[in-house]
Amino acid sequence: MEIEVEIRDDYEHEDKNLLYTPVNIPGSGVDDVIFAEQFEGCACSGTCVNANCGCIRGGTPFYYSCCGLADPDIPPNLIYECHVNCQCDSKCPNRLVQKGPHVGLSLMDAGPKGIGLWCKVDLPKGAFVCEYAGEVIGAEEARQRYAKQKNLGLRNYIFALREHFGKDTLPVLTYIDPSCIGNIGRYINHSCDPNLLIVPVRTDTFVPKICLFTRRNIAAYTELTFDYGGGAEPIQGVPDGWSEGTICRCMASVCRGFLPFDYSLG
Ligand SMILES: C[S@@+](CC[C@H](N)C(=O)[O-])C[C@H]1O[C@@H](n2cnc3c(N)ncnc32)[C@H](O)[C@@H]1O
């Protein structure tokens, strides 16, 4: 029996030239197979109990508490949620990001940074805010799109997620581009002292979802930010080659001066 969990995402773009997608979709330069190859589900009945659930797969035991909050102080390893092929029910605590973004997210004027995102309600530490969803594209496509938008003086929305799957292995990069097709996450600006944390989460396939959780309690109407260099493998400072020279306007006392940039795009 397949357990379908409804994604609740009522957001949309004000700019009618943009297409809204609540989840990642395959774009140019990636093999559709990675979206089609699904994990086997767990055989738990009702709600899952950590130790026996097949969805842990050697990754982090369930990252979420029973009240739907993550623990941002624990560095997560690989996170696999229960999914459509699992036997557990839709109330299983290991189903969180797949249910969609937090309610009350809203666009704001972020001055020289352009549009930004805030939430109309207080957010507790560990709350899931939203995914940074868009087209999943290949490395060469990402470089070409980046070069084109740079020539046109456009903002950059392409995010390069770096993950290591073992000691001494090369990082695996996943490029997400919500420039034209994306979700509400595309409006989140960078800060060198961010209040959100990036956590890659997988549900039914190996394609990671870039998920944003609160690092601390956040009062309503505070701008939501993440560190553009702080993926699963955070950049410390801005090493040579990791800045494209865009001045950072985050205003944090610890501001590094420039927006972080993944050199693989350059
Ligand atoms: C993912 S978009 C964020 C949404 C964007 N502000 C908008 O108006 O649609 C990333 C772009 O926002 C701007 N931006 C984000 N954070 C910034 C910061 N701390 N300082 C300056 N510009 C920033 C840059 O133009 C960057 O390329």
Image: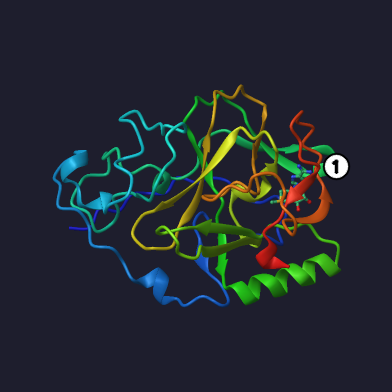
- The figure's colour scheme reads rainbow
Q: Which quarter of the picture shows residue 120?
A: top right
Q: Is residue 76 visible?
A: yes
Q: Quadrant of the N terminus?
A: bottom left
Q: In which quarter of the image is the C terminus?
A: bottom right
Where residue 125 appears, x then y in whole percent? Answer: 49, 26
Please tell me how crowded label 1 is: few (under 14), some (14-19), or many (20+) other residues with Cα within 10 Å.
few
**In this rendering, position of residue 202 left or right of residue 162:** left
Where residue 180 appears, x then y in whole percent? Answer: 67, 63
**In this rendering, position of residue 116 left or right of residue 137:** right
Name the residue: 18% across, 41% down: 51
Q: Which quarter of the picture shows residue 202?
A: bottom left
- Above/below status of 52 relative to 161: above
Where residue 191 appears, x then y in whole percent? Answer: 70, 38
Name the residue: 56% across, 23% down: 122
Name the residue: 42% across, 45% down: 97
Pick the front one: 49 or 45: 49
Q: Is residue 48 visible?
A: no
Secondary structure of residue under mark 1: helix
**In this rendering, position of residue 10 left or right of residue 120:** left
Q: Which quarter of the picture shows residue 152?
A: bottom right
Q: Name the residue type under label 1.
A: Pro
Tally of numbered tags = 1
Q: Looking at this view, name the residue that lies furthest to the front.
A: 168
**In this rendering, position of residue 251 left or right of residue 159:** right
- Above/below status of 89 relative to 252: below
- Some atom of ligand 1 lies within 8 Å of the CB belonging to the residue at label 1: yes
Residue where numbered disc 1 is placed: 112
